[in-house]
Structures are given as C-alpha cells and as structure tokens.
Image (cartoon, grey):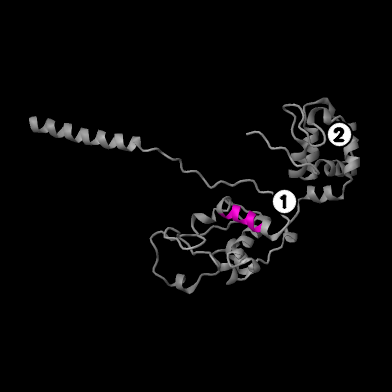
Amino acid sequence: MHYFLKTVLFVAGVLLFFAYIANSIPSRPSLPPEEGKINFAEVKTKDDLVSLGQKIFFGKGQCALCHSIGPSETARCPNLAGIGAKLSREFIYESLTQPNKFIYKQYEFSPPKPFAAQMPQINKPPIGLSENELLAVIAFVQSTGGQESVTVDPSELVKPAAQILAASGDAAKGQTIYKNLGCAQCHGTDGKKGIAGAPDLQVLAQRKDPLQFMSALQGGSSSKHQGLDARLTVKDLTDLMAYLTQFKAMPQPL
C-alpha cells in the first residue's frame, strides 16, 4: 500500500509538472490567410497586377498552403519558382481551373501516397476566385520566371458594370442631382463624411451594380428616399454614380 501511494503521488507530480510546462507556453491561434483588400480599380500597370496577384496567392487563393515560391522542405506540391518562363499562360489557367485534367507521367505512375493531395478548382467554392483574381494570380506566377514572362495586361481585366456606367456619366450633373435631392445633409459632400449612421454612398456606388445601387437608395429609413425610383431616370443615376465614384471611398469602421 505504501509503494502504491508513492507511485500515485509520483505519477500525479509528473502530470502536474507537464501540465504546468504546457500552460506556460504562449498559445498562438491558427488563423486563416489574411485576404486583405482587393481593388482592381487601382491596377494601372503589370507591376500592380503582379503585386495584387501575390496578395491573392498568399491570401484568398490559399495557394501557399501547398505550393512554395522557391525551395521548401514543407511544401506538399510543386515549387512554382520560375514556372512562368516554362509554361504557357493557357496551361497555367487550365491548371488553376481544371487541375485534374492533365497529370504528369511521373505522378501518374508513381506509388500511391497515404495522403494524396488534391488541388481544388480555385474558381469554384470554397475559394471561388473571380476571373480578374485568376488573371492576377497568373500574372504573379508568370513573374517568377522574370518580368518579361508576364503576358497578362491590365486592359484585360473585366470592369464592374457600375464602373462602366460611371465612366459614361456626367459628374457635374451628378453633383447637382446629389445636392438637389438633399443627399449631402446626411451622407456628406465632396468626398467628406456625413452624419453617423448614414451609409457612405461613395462605397455603394463603387461596389454595387446600378440596380443594387437604386435599391440601396430606396431602402433608406428617411422619408427622402421615398419615390426616388420615379424621380430619377437611368441617366440621372449614371450621372450620380459618376459624381460619387470620383472620390476615394472613406475607410469603413471595424
């Protein structure tokens, strides 16, 4: 009985010691990749596109979870450094959107792995990259083979409907409409912030298509929003969006 108690006390002491050591080590949460803000309206050059593609590669695209850019002992999938100079743009696009369509022979006939990695179609859920985001990733991958390897041009990016309409609108007329409707009283004017609680119409105009933008205007709680669908024509809306999108959107509170 004496030896049994000593054994129990010894085991309990060891467990308490290791529990103390484990709890004294600072814990760090495993967070998903930080997506960051993706704004294709700011892309003017190939360098801008490559930089945005790098952000998507290491963020929203989750490519770096398996691939590396350079030698790595932990990467489960091919090292993509320099691949832009070796593969065509069409092949890279196909590899991203249909990764199982072509399998290299050395992988096809190699011994099966206990945990075979399967690459998802990154233009489908859960990743779901847009066509513009795919082009940016391709530009970044191509850049690993040298800047001259980048064949994606910013002019190929698909512009949102709101951006296209805004480009055809008259900002001066839009400013007059904005003030005549009394929007400035709550939402601010000339790029300046309005009263607390009023949504930033600059953000709405840049992020939403025309129908969503009109719906947002009508959905306000103020009586001033009533009947806007009858008071504003499509041309008025286009001019209004041209006025609002000329200002840089204010940062939104967290």
Q: Is residue 244 visible?
A: yes
Observer-nearest of 144 and 115: 144
Q: Residue at x 76, y 32 (%)?
A: 193
The residue under label 1 is 42
Q: Residue at x 79, y 28 (%)?
A: 186
- State which quarter of the image contains the C terminus: top right
Tell me if mark 2 has few (under 14), some (14-19) or many (20+) residues whose alpha carbon lies within 10 angstroms of its own: some
- Tell whether label 2 touches label 1 (CB within 8 Å): no
Q: In the picture provided, is 78 more to the left or to the right than 153?
A: left
Q: Is residue 243 magenta?
A: no
Observer-nearest of 25 and 127: 25
Q: Main secondary structure of the magenta part?
A: helix
Quarter residue 19 falls in: top left
- State which quarter of the image contains the N terminus: top left
Q: Amino acid at mark 2?
A: Leu
The stretch of residues the image draws in magenta is 49-57
